[in-house]
Image (tube, rainbow, N blue to C red):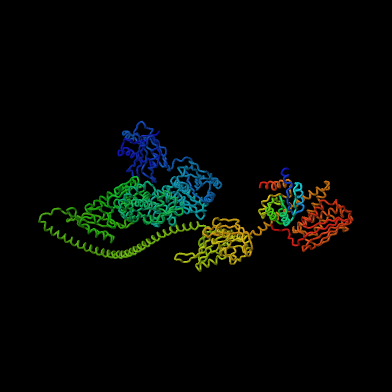
């Protein structure tokens, strides 16, 4: 939906991803969507810092950062009321905390359309509904 | 059709007299000689048939008349056999006749016809023939005479038809072994003997007999199988056919169906009997080898009829039964081997006897004197007096013996007798031979039974005496017949009688047989089976009278004609003796019988006998059956015994003279006249003073005194005569002188003087001891007595005379008295002596009697005891039998093999099942146990048996058999009565199944235990109180609980209470009681020693009937597994993450490369290259288990493709081994790849001269370690900065920053690219495994 995707333009989206190539890819997609890209950041600390220092419309969050669970970032984002989409390579881990389990997600390898739709849903509609 | 003499039905019986008178006439004509035996009649209905059979004495006619049934013919056929008279003596004055009567005149001439009269030929004579008187008389009485039949016996020689008269017949009887004997016989028998041979063998009725052809090979005579009616011709052999009875009839052989069932037949006897009857002296009977007693009875008849009897010597016979039986019965004339018999037969046949049995009479006229020497010899040598026997019989039998001895004349035979005592014995035996049998003439016996025996038994009180005498009893069959009848009557009337039967015979041999009471089977064939059973014991092939019956009879030797008889008899049975005696002897015997019977006693004679001239003595009870009853008082006068020879002679002399010749008559008449005239009245007396003969008028001197008639002289003497007469007789006897006395005899009122002379007769043999007493009146004045005395003047003379007379009388009386007294005294003396003797004998007898009584009592009491014991024994026996049966069934019915052993280990008894364990047969009883190879394995058996016998203990063992069965072998002592040990009882109970089950259980248990111990899962068994009953090794091991203290302790207590887990409690206390089976109950617990454990518990309640429940608990420690599972889950998600990442990376590379590439080719190359690098980086990681990668390896790998062919070493690498974090390793690989690719495309590696040097080192930067890596290219093509910036450099720079958290500097110097990467290095980077 072009219209939906238009709504994405100009949104300030944070990329949290430890793998550079993947980050590049996501970056490119966001560029195509005319989002304003914040990051990418690859560590928990950088992520915290970035979240606090910037006004965000949404975040694309890798579930796993260097072997660590990215739930703290998720918590942080939630705390700042920033919607986020989990970009993940797997369905979910049993031990995942609920914040991650409940989160909307997009699977890797990322499909552009899927990403766009999800973003529209999460970053545009939901906040609008709130 | 011939007509017959009839009597009318309208004539009532008593007025048969016309007919009987007619018969008389016929009889007197004496034309006919023979009696009717039986005949067949056929005549019209409503005619009467009557048969007249007069008895021998012509006094009575026995007439029977009946009316045949309408339409019935042959009624008389039935009647006549009843009239059969057997045996009928040959010479009889009684002629027979058969008459048939019809009142109907119209049937005259058609009434009847005699068909046949067996045994006799007959000639019919018309009624009108010789008896015109008869005819007219009968016609007047409306009797239509038909005919009188004249019957003559067939056996009288008939006008010869052809050359041969009927040939002598040799009957040969044999059985087993007979064929051999027959072969021997015929082998030496010439073919021209003139004899006919009839062979009777026991043949199997089912098979055709080859006998005729067998014999045909042996003899030249024609041999033929007998067909019914075949004529007997000489020099031929006739052979019996199977399953038929054979008889001789006339000159034919007749076959018939046998009357007896198979097995009871006596064909030889049957044939011999008919042979005896039809051929008489011309019969020869031969008995050869065979079993049984067939032939003996028949042979007896043959001999009795005057035939010859020859028996095979038993020693030469294969089977000696039949010969022995004949010999034992004493009927054999010759005993020899079969091949010697023909010689005897030929000699016998040629002797005159065979040719003319009566010829002996013809040989010597006046047979009497010639026969006398023989008879005298017999009397002298054997004591048997045959003078009273019928001459004819004597002659024939003597002639036969002459024939046997091959003597031609009587004189020669008499010589033989003198020299050969054996011949005397044989002759006596032959002369006395008679045929007797059981119930001979059964109807006569039945009549006796009914008419005499029944009333006799009925009238007697219980235990009263019945005395019976059977003289001439021969071998006793008749006596026993009589005894059987009496006993049966007594039993039927429930009376016990004191039965005394005397049976006498003059032959001791006969008595021996009779006493023994054993008779061959053929002899008892006429006896009914009930009687046989009641009175006989069955012996081998013979029957013996039972002892009880034999004991009733006293057998004694007695000669009827010589010895005193018995007395006070109720019944005398004497059958078929009188017919052998002449009529004088018969009369004497009958008188004797009269004397011997009590008043009213009965006499039973044979069918051909009567009481003769003594009918005054007897009343006829049954004419037909010869039963008589004694009449009148005892007649001493008619009985004389013993009979002296002279007396017998005088008896003869008393007989009316035989047909006198004329001269003899005159002499006799003259003699009589002289005697009458001149001889005084006399009497002849014997030594006992009995008058034997009166001559002249003796009435003046003798008179019969009142009372019973007497012949005693002195009794008869008139008054006055007696004393003198007595004296005179005595004197005459003593002095052998004549003595004359005178006496005064009172004769009515007168007294006469009589002179009596007593004269002994001259002593001759005939007159010894006889006296002649003659009387004569004396002519004396005093003798003429006057009835009235004269006048008184004579008184004086009278007185004087009478005084004288008186004086004389007195004198003579005194003398008489004296002599009388003397007589009396001497008589007294004698009497006294006799008395003393008698008294002493009496004493002796008394004491003997007492002894006998005592013995008898003793015997009786023994008998009683024995009887009781016997009874007891019987009962015990029965009990024993029952018990034995019970025991047998009980023990045989059990499945337990039982063996009884005695004290010596010998087998006493075993049950049939024992055969599974020992090879036992019933005959093994008594053999020791050790004799048997056991079919089972029990090494201790004998030892155990010993122990049991010694110590009286029980013993058990389990043993196996060879067949694989298991038994419980038990031994217990065998206790006999009174608890005495008599052995041991050995039993084997099959426990195979039980054992197998037990073994199976054991096995199962071991199996289960093994399983339990082997499995790795801990297992617990708890009781209902949760106390540990058992635990397996896995439990002890896993939970580190010592085995020792576990048992019976509550689970919560184990291992210092470490099992006191709430979850566990919950399981046992809440969950388990509700359910029987629990599965996968999770318990998580932190054990002290073990740490945290996650356990899956399975629990199950095990309910056991009759025993407490158990709880089975299986514990599965899944701690590790859980961890491992968790770990696995993490790994999987990690991997998935990484793979997705890699794919995303690839996606990225593809996108970037696409953007950069100008062509598809270019894209392909660049994309492949980058992909390869990425893969290679991952390889490295994988190699290190994703723990990290070695920088050195990494560099080398990346540069590997470019070093191929690099001999010169233009690429150099150096730096320490440094482990990089996984992700760093990948990033660095990509970076190096870019650098290398670039170098290969545009940089130093694109020319052969270009060099590359990669080095790195660890540095410290502000306290934190970092790595500095340098990429130095040189001697490559000149560098152009801007065209190189693309994805590659972007990747390098940003990746370094992003992923390595470092910095990258790319300096494009002239000589080549100079790149520097610096990034922090975490020494303690943990390998890839992480939490979360």
Whether residue B659 sits left or right of residue A50 in the image: it is left
Vertical arrangement, residue B1322 with respect to residue B158, above or below? below
Camera-side residue of B370 and A35: A35
Location of residue B729 in the rendering, given as x and y in whole percent from the top left corner: 26, 59
Q: Which residue occupies 85% across, 52% down?
A: B1284
Camera-side residue of B1186 and B1111: B1186
Kindly indicate the quadrant of the structure image that contains residue B1225.
bottom right
Location of residue B659 in the rendering, given as x and y in whole percent from the top left corner: 34, 46
Visible residue check, residue B399: no
Location of residue B688 in the rendering, given as x and y in whole percent from the top left corner: 28, 57
Visible residue check, residue B627: yes
Q: Quadrant of the C terminus of chain B?
A: bottom right
Count the marks: how many?
0
Location of residue B503 in the rendering, given as x and y in whole percent from the top left corner: 36, 54
Camera-side residue of B703 and B448: B448
Q: Quadrant of the N terminus of chain B?
A: top left
Q: Furthest residue to the top?
A: B106
Whether residue B221 sits left or right of residue A58 in the image: it is left
Vertical arrangement, residue B878 with respect to residue B88, above or below? below
Whether residue B887 sits left or right of residue B481 in the image: it is right
Camera-side residue of B367 and B484: B484
């Amino acid at each position: 939906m072009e219209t939906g995707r238009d709504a994405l333009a100009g949104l300030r989206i944070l990329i949290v991803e430890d793998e550079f190539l993947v980050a590049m890819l996501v970056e490119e997609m966001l560029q195509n969507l005319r989002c304003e890209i914040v990051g990418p950041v690859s560590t928990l600390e950088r992520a915290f810092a970035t979240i606090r220092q910037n006004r965000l419309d949404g975040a694309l969050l890798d579930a796993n950062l260097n072997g660590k669970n990215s739930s703290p970032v998720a918590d942080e984002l939630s705390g700042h009321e920033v919607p986020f989409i989990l970009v993940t390579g797997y369905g979910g881990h049993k031990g995942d905390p609920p914040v991650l389990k409940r989160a909307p997600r997009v699977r890797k390898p990322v499909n552009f359309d899927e990403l766009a739709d999800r973003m529209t849903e999460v970053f545009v509609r939901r906040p609008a509904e709130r | 059709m011939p007509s017959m003499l009839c009597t009318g039905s309208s004539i009532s019986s008593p007025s048969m007299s016309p007919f009987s008178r007619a018969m008389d006439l016929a009889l007197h004509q004496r034309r006919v000689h023979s009696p009717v035996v039986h005949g067949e009649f056929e005549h019209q209905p409503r005619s009467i048939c009557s048969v007249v059979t007069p008895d021998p004495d012509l006094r009575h006619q026995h007439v029977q008349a009946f009316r045949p049934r309408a339409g019935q013919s042959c009624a008389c056929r039935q009647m006549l056999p009843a009239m059969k008279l057997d045996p009928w003596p040959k010479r009889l004055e009684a002629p027979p006749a058969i008459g048939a009567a019809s009142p109907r005149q119209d049937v005259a001439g058609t009434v009847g016809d005699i068909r046949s009269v067996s045994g006799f030929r007959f000639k019919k004579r018309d009624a009108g023939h010789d008896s015109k008187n008869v005819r007219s008389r009968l016609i007047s009485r409306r009797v239509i005479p038909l005919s009188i039949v004249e019957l003559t016996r067939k056996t009288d020689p008939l006008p010869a038809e052809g050359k041969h008269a009927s040939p002598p017949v040799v009957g040969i009887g044999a059985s087993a072994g007979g064929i051999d004997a027959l072969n021997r016989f015929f082998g030496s028998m010439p073919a021209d003997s003139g004899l006919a041979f009839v062979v009777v063998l026991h043949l199997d009725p089912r098979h055709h007999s080859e006998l005729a052809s067998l014999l045909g090979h042996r003899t030249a005579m024609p041999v033929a199988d007998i067909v019914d009616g075949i004529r007997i011709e000489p020099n031929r052999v006739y052979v019996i056919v199977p399953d038929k009875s054979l008889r001789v009839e006339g000159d034919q052989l007749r076959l018939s169906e046998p009357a007896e069932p198979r097995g009871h037949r006596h064909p030889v006897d049957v044939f011999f009997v008919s042979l005896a009857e039809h051929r008489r002296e011309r019969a020869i009977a031969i008995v050869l080898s065979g079993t049984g007693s067939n032939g003996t009875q028949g042979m007896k008849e043959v001999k009795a009829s005057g035939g010859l009897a020859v028996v095979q010597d038993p020693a030469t016979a294969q089977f000696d039964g039949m010969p022995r039986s004949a010999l034992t019965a004493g009927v054999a004339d010759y005993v020899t081997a079969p091949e010697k018999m023909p010689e005897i037969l030929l000699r016998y046949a040629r002797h005159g006897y065979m040719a003319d049995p009566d010829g002996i009479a013809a040989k010597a006229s006046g047979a009497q004197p010639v026969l006398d020497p023989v008879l005298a010899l017999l009397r002298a040598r054997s004591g048997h007096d045959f003078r009273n026997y019928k001459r004819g019989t004597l002659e024939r039998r003597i002639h036969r013996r002459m024939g046997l001895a091959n003597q031609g004349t009587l004189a020669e035979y008499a010589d033989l007798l003198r020299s050969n005592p054996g011949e005397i014995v044989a002759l006596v035996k032959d002369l006395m031979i008679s045929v007797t049998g059981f119930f001979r003439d059964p109807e006569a016996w039945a009549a006796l039974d009914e008419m005499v025996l029944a009333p006799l038994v009925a009238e007697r009180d219980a235990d009263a005496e019945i005395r019976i005498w059977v003289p001439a009893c021969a071998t006793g069959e008749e006596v026993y017949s009589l005894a059987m009848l009496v006993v049966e009557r007594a039993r039927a009337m429930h009376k016990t009688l004191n039965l005394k039967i005397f049976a006498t015979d003059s032959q001791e041999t006969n008595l021996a047989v009779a006493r023994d009471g054993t008779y061959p089977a053929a002899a008892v064939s006429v006896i009914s089976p009930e009687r046989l059973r009641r009175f006989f014991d069955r012996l081998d092939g013979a029957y013996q009278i039972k002892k009880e019956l034999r004991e009733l009879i006293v057998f004694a030797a007695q000669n009827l004609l010589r010895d005193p008889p018995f007395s006070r008899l109720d019944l005398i049975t004497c059958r078929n003796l009188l017919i052998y005696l002449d009529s004088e002897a018969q009369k004497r015997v009958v008188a004797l019988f009269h004397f011997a019977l009590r008043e009213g006693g009965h006499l039973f004679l044979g069918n051909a006998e009567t009481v003769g001239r003594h009918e005054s003595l007897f009343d006829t009870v049954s004419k037909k059956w010869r039963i008589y009853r004694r009449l009148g008082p005892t007649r001493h006068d008619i009985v004389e015994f013993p009979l002296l020879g002279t007396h017998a002679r005088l008896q003869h002399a008393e007989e009316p003279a035989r047909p006198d010749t004329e001269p003899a008559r005159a002499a006799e008449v003259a003699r009589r006249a002289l005697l009458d005239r001149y001889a005084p009245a006399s009497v002849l007396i014997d030594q006992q003073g009995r008058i034997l003969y009166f001559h002249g008028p003796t009435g003046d001197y003798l008179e019969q005194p009142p009372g019973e008639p007497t012949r005693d002289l002195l009794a008869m003497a008139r008054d006055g005569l007696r004393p003198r007469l007595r004296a005179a007789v005595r004197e005459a006897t003593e002095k052998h002188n004549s003595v004359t006395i005178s006496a005064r005899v009172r004769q009515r009122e007168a007294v006469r003087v009589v002179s009596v002379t007593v004269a002994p007769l001259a002593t001759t043999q005939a007159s010894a001891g006889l006296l002649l007493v003659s009387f004569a009146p004396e002519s004396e004045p005093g003798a003429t007595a006057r009835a009235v005395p004269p006048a008184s003047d004579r008184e004086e003379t009278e007185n004087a005379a009478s005084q004288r007379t008186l004086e004389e009388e007195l004198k003579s009386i005194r003398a008489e008295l004296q002599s009388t007294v003397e007589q009396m005294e001497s008589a007294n003396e004698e009497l006294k002596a006799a008395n003393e003797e008698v008294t002493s004998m009496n004493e002796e007898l008394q004491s003997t009697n007492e002894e006998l009584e005592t013995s008898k009592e003793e015997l009786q009491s023994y008998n009683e005891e024995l009887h009781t014991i016997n009874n007891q024994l019987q009962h015990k026996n029965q009990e024993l039998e029952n018990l034995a049966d019970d025991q047998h069934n009980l023990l045989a019915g059990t499945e337990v093999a039982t063996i009884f052993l005695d004290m010596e280990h010998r087998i006493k008894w075993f049950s049939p099942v024992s055969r599974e364990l020992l090879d036992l047969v019933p005959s093994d009883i008594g053999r020791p146990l050790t004799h048997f190879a056991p079919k089972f394995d029990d090494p201790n058996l004998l030892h155990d048996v010993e122990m049991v016998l010694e110590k009286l203990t029980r013993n058990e063992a389990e043993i196996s058999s060879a067949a694989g069965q298991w038994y419980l072998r038990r031994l217990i002592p065998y206790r006999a009565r009174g608890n005495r040990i008599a052995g041991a009882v050995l039993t084997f109970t099959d426990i195979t199944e039980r054992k197998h089950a037990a073994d199976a259980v054991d096995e199962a248990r071991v199996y289960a235990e093994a399983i339990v111990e082997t499995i790795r899962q801990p297992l617990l068994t708890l009781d209902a109180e949760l106390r540990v009953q058992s635990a397996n090794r896995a439990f002890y091991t896993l939970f580190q609980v010592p085995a020792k203290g576990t048992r019976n302790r509550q689970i919560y207590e184990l291992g210092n209470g470490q099992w006191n887990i709430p979850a566990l409690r919950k399981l046992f206390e809440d969950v388990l009681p509700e359910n029987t089976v629990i599965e996968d109950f999770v318990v998580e617990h932190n054990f002290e020693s073990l740490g945290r454990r996650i356990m899956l518990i399975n629990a199950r309640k095990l309910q056991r009937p009759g025993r407490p429940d158990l709880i089975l608990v299986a514990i599965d420690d899944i701690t590790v597994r859980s961890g491992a599972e968790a770990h696995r889950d993490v790994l999987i998600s990690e991997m998935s993450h990484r793979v997705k990442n890699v794919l995303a990376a690839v996606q990225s590379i593809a996108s970037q490369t696409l953007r950069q590439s100008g062509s598809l080719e270019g894209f392909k190359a660049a994309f492949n290259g980058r992909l390869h690098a990425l893969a290679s980086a991952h390889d490295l990681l994988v190699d290190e288990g994703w723990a990290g990668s070695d920088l050195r390896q990494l560099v080398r790998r990346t540069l590997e493709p470019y070093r191929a062919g690099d001999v010169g070493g233009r690429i150099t690498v150096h730096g320490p081994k440094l482990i990089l974090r996984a992700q760093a390793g990948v990033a660095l690989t990509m970076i190096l790849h870019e650098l290398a690719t670039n170098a290969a495309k545009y940089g130093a590696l694109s020319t052969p001269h270009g060099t590359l040097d990669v080095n790195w080192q660890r540095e410290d930067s502000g306290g934190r370690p970092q790595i500095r890596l340098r990429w130095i290219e040189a001697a490559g093509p000149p560098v152009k900065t801007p065209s190189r910036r693309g994805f590659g450099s972007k990747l390098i720079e940003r990746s370094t920053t992003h992923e390595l958290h470092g910095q990258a500097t790319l300096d494009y110097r002239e000589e080549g690219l100079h790149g520097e990467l610096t990034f922090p290095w975490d020494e303690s980077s943990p390998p890839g495994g992480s939490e979360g």
